Image (tube, rainbow, N blue to C red):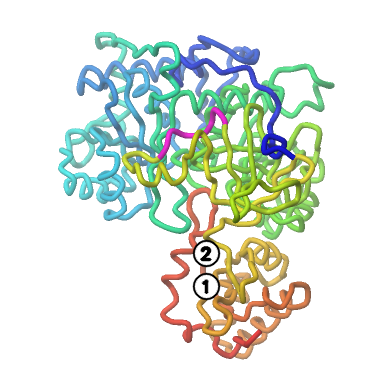
């Protein structure tokens, strides 16, 4: 059997244009790979969840161009100028990015919840010339900017309207309103092939096992993944009765995923606009407000991460809302167990439901559940997108066959350029056009099954324990709201699985004052695992109750932060530990 026969491939793809910037592709309709549905008159691209304000495609284009004029006039933003956006979801988030792209600039996205030190770390990598910041985190950002030598007159407040903010800074809305009266700007045009290497976004990696790196994403990467997703989902094709098509003009998608994270930025914002959907943009996730928005706006499409899927399965408020409008639901960013998938189908019985799989380094997506499946293969991360190749490399360097486990390598137009200003990490991860994902997987009948991040596998007496497997099972326990598993050192076994558990609120309150109840709950949870899992997977490392599981914006568990919570191996439920 040749090596080529062991390389998996998605469906064929007509090459995306490689001479366009993201806004030229998305807003101007300069070139279309699939027939882009013309929006009905008045059909909005965005709805601001809190106010109901609607923004059409023409308005997005105008606001983008007006802001570009203001940025050119006041700051002479030009070729490869790096600007950072630090904000929760905002109706003009996309316009800021696209205005910078019009001028040849680069957009670095950061979450607003970082500490001053974390902002400094990111600024030292990207070295931004401008910062667009929401007032919620203004103080920390001003301190961090000062520490890296960025003057305050290069900071724009995103949400202050009509007058300078308390520090005398300019505000975004005034700049946009000023744009029509300013001289025009010269738009950056790309030559053939230039989009492949012209950086559009600098996005932080997930940071689940260490400090986040900064991923350099080209204009071509973004355009490619939008077209790959559109082709995979046959956008605007008459492949069946209209009532059965997955994406239709006029559909409405939830928009709580943070736009500073790749899942929200590319799939939720860029792809949904391209596909003709309306995105209900929510600044921050609140579960009951999320349910109310589904009911109010008759949302048809849900883009979720596992914590929200768990809430839909377990939260009592779900029964108080009408969710019958929902027809499509994709869960991505972390694996969802087969059991939870089945529970979610009980809540949303008429939905097309499945998972997607990807990384920041793949512009968000490698695979998703296909149109041929109303419910994606249970436990699967989906099937490879068009124009994507994948291979599974075993520990000895040989290629794995069907059902054999190894590390996934992928290749395609969505694979990023590398890590910005980190040549060593780039050479380690991006090899001869292939991306080493760091994920242990296997293929079965075209589906990708992700076992675990290789760095997160727990090794008990040489046997591998995937934390995600135990976490998925723990979430089926009636007393548990959330769970995370890490390995703790053990002299005899090497490592032992240990669980951090978030209890149902009433139980959590009672367990803090009733040690007997706490012990009973630990025993019940331990038995819940021991009854169905091999002995090396038992929670012999202990069970610790906690108020919350630390996660990044995409819902991935930050296990490195859990490890810092452990004072020592003896501080956690010593009585539950046992030799295997």
Rendering coords of residue 438 (x, y %): 54, 51
Left or right: where 430 falls relative to 421: right
* Residue lying furthest right: 241
Q: Are marks 1 and 2 in contact (CB under 8 Å)?
A: yes
Q: Which residues are magenta?
A: 412-418
- Is residue 140 or residue 543 the one in the foreground? 543
Residue 330 part of the magenta-drawn span: no
The C terminus lies in which quarter of the figure?
Answer: bottom right
Residue 13, by quadrant, is top right
- Residue pointed to by mark 2: 549
Residue 256, by quadrant, is top right
Rendering coords of residue 330 (x, y %): 67, 41
Task: Give the class, few, some or many, for how many residues have Cα within 10 Å of label 2's Cα (few <14, many ≥20).
Answer: some
**Mark 2: which secondary structure?**
loop
Q: How many marks?
A: 2
Left or right: where 406 falls relative to 109: right
- Is residue 550 or residue 1 the one in the foreground? 1
Rendering coords of residue 534 (x, y %): 74, 74
In the rendered image of this protein, does residue 118 appear above or below residue 178?
below
Task: Give the class, few, some or many, for how many residues have Cα within 10 Å of label 1's Cα (few <14, many ≥20).
Answer: some
Rendering coords of residue 28 (x, y %): 49, 12
- Residue pointed to by mark 1: 546
């Amino acid at each position: 059997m040749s090596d080529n026969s062991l390389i998996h491939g998605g469906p064929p793809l007509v090459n995306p244009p490689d001479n366009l910037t993201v806004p030229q592709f998305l807003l101007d309709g300069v070139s279309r790979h699939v027939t882009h549905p013309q929006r009905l008159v008045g059909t909005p691209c965005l709805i601001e969840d809190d106010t109901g304000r609607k923004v059409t495609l023409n308005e997005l284009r105008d606001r983008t161009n007006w802001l570009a004029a203001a940025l050119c006039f006041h700051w002479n933003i030009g070729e490869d100028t790096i600007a950072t956006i630090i904000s929760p979801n905002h109706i003009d988030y996309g316009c800021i990015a696209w205005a910078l792209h019009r001028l040849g600039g680069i957009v670095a996205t950061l979450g607003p919840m970082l500490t001053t030190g974390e902002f400094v770390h990111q600024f030292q990598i990207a070295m931004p010339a401008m910062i667009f910041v929401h007032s919620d985190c203004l103080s920390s950002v001003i301190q961090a900017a000062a520490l890296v030598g960025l003057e305050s007159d290069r900071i724009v407040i995103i949400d202050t309207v009509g007058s300078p903010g308390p520090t005398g800074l300019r505000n975004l809305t005034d700049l946009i309103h000023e744009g029509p009266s300013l001289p025009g700007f010269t738009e950056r045009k790309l030559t053939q092939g230039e989009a492949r290497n012209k950086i559009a976004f600098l996005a932080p990696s997930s940071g689940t096992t260490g400090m986040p790196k900064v991923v350099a994403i080209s204009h071509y990467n973004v355009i490619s993944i939008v077209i790959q997703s559109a082709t995979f989902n046959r956008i605007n094709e008459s492949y069946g009765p209209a009532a059965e098509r997955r994406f239709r003009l006029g559909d409405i998608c939830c928009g709580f995923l943070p736009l500073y994270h790749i899942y929200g930025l590319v799939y939720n914002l860029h792809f949904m606009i391209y596909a003709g959907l309306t995105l209900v943009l929510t600044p921050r996730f609140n579960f009951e407000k999320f349910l109310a928005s589904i009911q109010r706006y008759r949302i048809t499409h849900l883009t979720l991460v596992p914590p929200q899927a768990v809430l839909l399965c377990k939260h009592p408020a779900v029964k108080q809302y009408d969710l019958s409008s929902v027809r499509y639901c994709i869960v991505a960013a972390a694996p969802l167990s087969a059991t939870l998938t089945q529970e979610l189908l009980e809540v949303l019985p008429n939905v097309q439901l499945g998972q997607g799989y990807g990384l920041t380094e793949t512009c968000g997506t490698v695979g998703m559940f296909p149109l041929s499946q109303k419910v994606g293969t249970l436990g699967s991360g989906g099937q490879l997108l068009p124009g994507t190749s994948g291979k599974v490399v075993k520990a000895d360097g040989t290629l794995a066959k069907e059902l054999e486990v190894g590390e996934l390598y992928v290749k395609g137009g969505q694979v990023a350029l590398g890590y910005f200003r980190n040549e060593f990490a780039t050479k380690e991860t991006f090899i001869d056009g292939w991306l080493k994902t760091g994920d242990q997987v296997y293929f079965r009948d075209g589906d990708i099954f992700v076992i675990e991040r290789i760095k997160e596998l727990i090794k008990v007496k040489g046997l591998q324990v995937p934390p995600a497997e135990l976490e998925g099972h723990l979430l089926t326990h009636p007393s548990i709201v959330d769970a995370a598993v890490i390995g703790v050192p053990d002299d005899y076994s090497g490592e032992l699985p240990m669980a951090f558990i978030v209890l149902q609120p009433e139980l959590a309150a009672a367990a803090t004052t009733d040690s007997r109840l706490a012990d009973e709950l630990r025993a019940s949870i331990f038995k819940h695992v021991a009854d169905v899992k091999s002995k090396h997977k038992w929670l012999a490392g202990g069970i610790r109750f906690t108020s919350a599981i630390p996660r990044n914006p995409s819902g991935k568990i930050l296990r490195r932060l859990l490890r810092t919570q452990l004072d020592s191996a003896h501080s956690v439920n010593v009585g539950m530990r046992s030799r295997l």
